[in-house]
Image: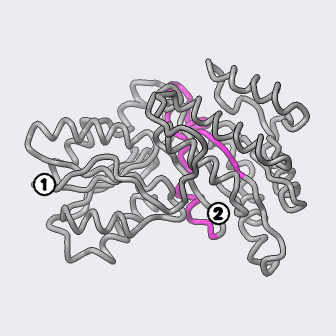
Amino acid sequence: MAIITYAQAFFDGIHEAMASEPRMSIIGRSIFGHGAGRGFERKLDEDFAGRIIDPPTAEGAVAALAIGAAMAGERIFAHFGTASFALEAFNQLVNEAAVAHYMSNGQVSVPVTFHMYHGVRGGGGAQHSASPQGMFANIAGLEVVLPSTPADVKGLIRTALKSDNPTIFINHTALMGIEGEVPDGEFDIPFGQADIKRQGADVTAVAMSRMVHRTLEAAEIVAADGIETEVVDPRTAAPLDADTICKSVAKTGRLVTVEEAIGPCSIGSEIAATVAEHAFGALKAPIVRLARAPVPVPFSPPLEDAITPSAKDIAAAIRKVMG
């Protein structure tokens, strides 16, 4: 296995898909952010000239173009930039992309991947820091993906770009520079298949995207107290691998959910409800949910930190559920 950055793995997955599928096109720019990742974008331009469209800043138009092209037989990767901007295209995503296959009795598919960056980003303010994954997971017909590691982002983007369903692919800019082992060659990761990032016997902690890494840090903190935390990364919010989560809770008897989105009506809420419904008998303590404070994200980085779960906050939540 090679050790590469998250951005490199993301690029590799897209490049492999473009090379193997001549019908695939990209709508959008700055896919890899505005920093060092620009080199990856230049490489896509060099290798796939004519298949990358630089649209105006009009997310509704981008979504409409992507959906129409996908319905006509193309395979599309559409980039919105920040997830906050994707809300400008919410009508097209919900009332067109998500329902076309069902309402056409299977005659129309929408093979388009909508890509965006979520979460606090260091001075992004309320209009650039949304984490709307719970909103998208609530829409029947959409697949929702939140990778956390280089290996996961490569395997999952390859699966997304092969899917005949509209897929919401959500990254976090804070992950782009992290490094990790990635299997050699081409590989896909199926949707709806969670990954246990750390084995443990005392408490199950479920997290996605950047919060996986903070939860792993918290697991190291509480390990000094003799608490062994099992960290489960669902990887996809829709479909959700409830079976792996419930099996983990059946082993540990305790559950903590961690997310960067706000708590009400969130993916953490759905996980908690699923465990309460299907694994209630295994619980030794009430479920603890940890999320971003339910306020607009402030511009000030110290205030961003104050409203976002830290490793210490997660460790405290784990200690709480342990009593």
Residue shown at the point (62%, 18%) measured from the top left: 36
Reply above or below: 231 against 119. below
Q: Secondary structure at mark 1?
A: helix
Label 2: how many residues lie within 10 Å, few (<14), some (14-19) or many (20+)? Answer: many
Q: Residue at x 32, y 77 (%)?
A: 278
**Picture quadrant where residue 117 is located:** top right
Residue under label 2 = 142
**Whole-percent x, y for residue 31 in the image:** 69, 33
Residue 55 visible in this rendered orientation of the protein:
no
Distance, label 1 to label 2, CA atoms, is: 36 Å
* Amino acid on which disc 2 is placed: Leu
Left or right: where 46 falls relative to 153: right
Mark sitting on residue 322: 1
The magenta segment is 113-140
On whether residue 29 falls in the magenta region, the answer is no
* Residue drawn at 50 percent across, 59 percent down: 237
Q: Nearer the viewer, residue 7 or 225?
A: 7
Q: Is residue 228 left or right of residue 14?
A: left
- Helix, strand or loop at disc 2? loop
**Residue 142 image offset from top left, x and y in percent:** 64, 63
Left or right relative to 71: residue 300: left
Instruction: Tell me if 216 is positioned left or right of 252 in this view.
Output: right
Would you place residue 175 above or below residue 168 in this image? above
Q: At 82% from the left edge and 77% from the top edge, which residue is drawn?
A: 104
Q: Quadrant of the C terminus?
A: bottom left
Amino acid type of the residue that numbered disc 1 sits on in the rendered structure: Met
Q: Tag 2 or tag 1, which sits nearer the N-term? A: 2
